[in-house]
Image (cartoon, rainbow, N blue to C red):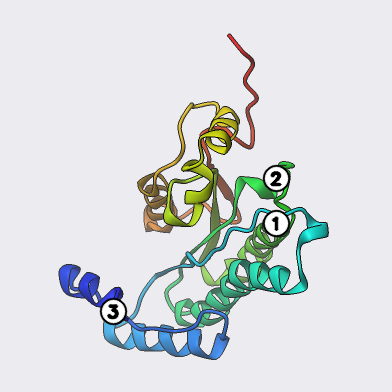
């Protein structure tokens, strides 16, 4: 709450705190948000984690943590948000990863949990289409945040990772935020069940030396 309060005061946002792994807390926070805002038409789940380990070195606790943080929180947001949108429709945006669709070494837990998000997107988009609720996801490449600092702040790993991104740079939080806002907007009212790659070409392009 200490980190949210300044943002709340700066932008005039309502805020509520919940442990996103616990669906009852998510449901309460969304209900509180609905009451404070007088309703809403979009929900976005940004919870995520990074674990770079081969599977034979991944403990059960590691696995549960990654799947819980990435997939369980996403399911909880969908589960709690859609009933609030039954009357007027709305948009839900989740966060996948380029790692879900290509083979990246040491990404087994991340790739599996993010692939689960993509399956969730397609199924939920079908389930709730009749209620005019759209469900989509963005799939980033490596974005320069505190969470990924150990990769982009290490010269060797940064060089290797950067070479995989054909546009020649890492993503910035603003790149992902703009894509999420675009998908969440009612202007994109005919887009649902889609995974939007925002990854500098990582998942779909392969460059060769010039």
Q: Which residue is drawn at 60% across and 66% down?
A: 70
Q: In this view, does 206 lie to the left or right of 6?
A: right
Nearer-the-camera pick, 40 or 190: 40
The span from disc 1 to disc 2 (Cα, nearest Å) is 7 Å
Question: Which quadrant of the figure has residue 39?
Answer: bottom left
The tag earlier along the polypeptide, 3 or 2, is 3
Residue nearer the viewer, 35 or 2: 2
Mark drawn on residue 203: none
Q: Is residue 95 left or right of residue 13?
A: right
Left or right placement of residue 193 versus residue 15 in this view: right
Q: Which of marks 1 and 3 is in front?
A: 3
Q: How would you rate the neighbour count of disc 2 (Cα within 10 Å): few for under 14, some for 14-19, many for 20 or more?
A: some
Q: Name the residue under label 3.
A: 2
Q: How many other residues sit within 10 Å of disc 1, few (<14), some (14-19) or many (≥20)?
A: some
Image position, residue 165 (x, y; %): 55, 31
Check contact, mark 1 vs mark 3: CB within 8 A. no
Q: Name the residue under label 1.
A: 115
Residue 64, x across and y down, in percent: 70, 73
Asked if residue 47 is positioned above or below residue 27 in the image, the reply reads: above
Dividing the picture into quarters, in which one does residue 73 lie? bottom right
Q: In this view, does 122 lie to the left or right of 139?
A: right
Q: Between marks 3 and 2, how big is the CA–CA gap? A: 37 Å
Do the residues bearing badges 1 and 2 touch, measured as CB atoms within 8 Å? yes
Mark 2 sits on what residue? Answer: 101
Task: Give x and y (percent) for residue 54.
Answer: 76, 53
Please name the residue shown 71% across and 59% down the image.
109
- Residue 4 at what x, y percent from top left? 29, 75
């Amino acid at each position: 709450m200490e980190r949210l309060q300044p943002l709340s005061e700066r932008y005039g946002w309502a805020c509520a705190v919940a442990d996103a792994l616990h669906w009852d807390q998510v449901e309460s926070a969304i209900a509180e948000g609905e009451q404070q805002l007088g309703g809403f038409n979009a929900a976005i789940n940004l919870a995520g984690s990074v674990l770079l380990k081969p599977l034979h070195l991944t403990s059960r606790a590691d696995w549960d943590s990654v799947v819980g943080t990435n997939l369980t929180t996403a399911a909880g947001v969908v589960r709690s948000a859609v009933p609030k949108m039954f009357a007027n429709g709305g948009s839900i945006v989740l966060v996948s990863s380029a790692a879900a669709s290509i083979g990246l070494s040491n990404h087994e837990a991340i790739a599996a949990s993010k692939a689960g998000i993509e399956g969730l997107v397609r199924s939920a988009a079908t389930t709730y289409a009749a209620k005019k609720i759209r469900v989509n996801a963005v799939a980033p490449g490596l974005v320069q945040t505190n969470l990924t600092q150990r990769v982009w702040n290490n010269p060797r790993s940064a060089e290797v990772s950067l070479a995989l991104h054909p546009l020649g740079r890492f993503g910035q939080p603003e790149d992902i935020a703009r894509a999420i806002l675009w998908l969440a907007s009612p202007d994109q009212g005919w887009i649902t069940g889609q995974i939007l790659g925002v990854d500098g070409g990582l998942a779909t392009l392969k460059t060769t030396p010039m």
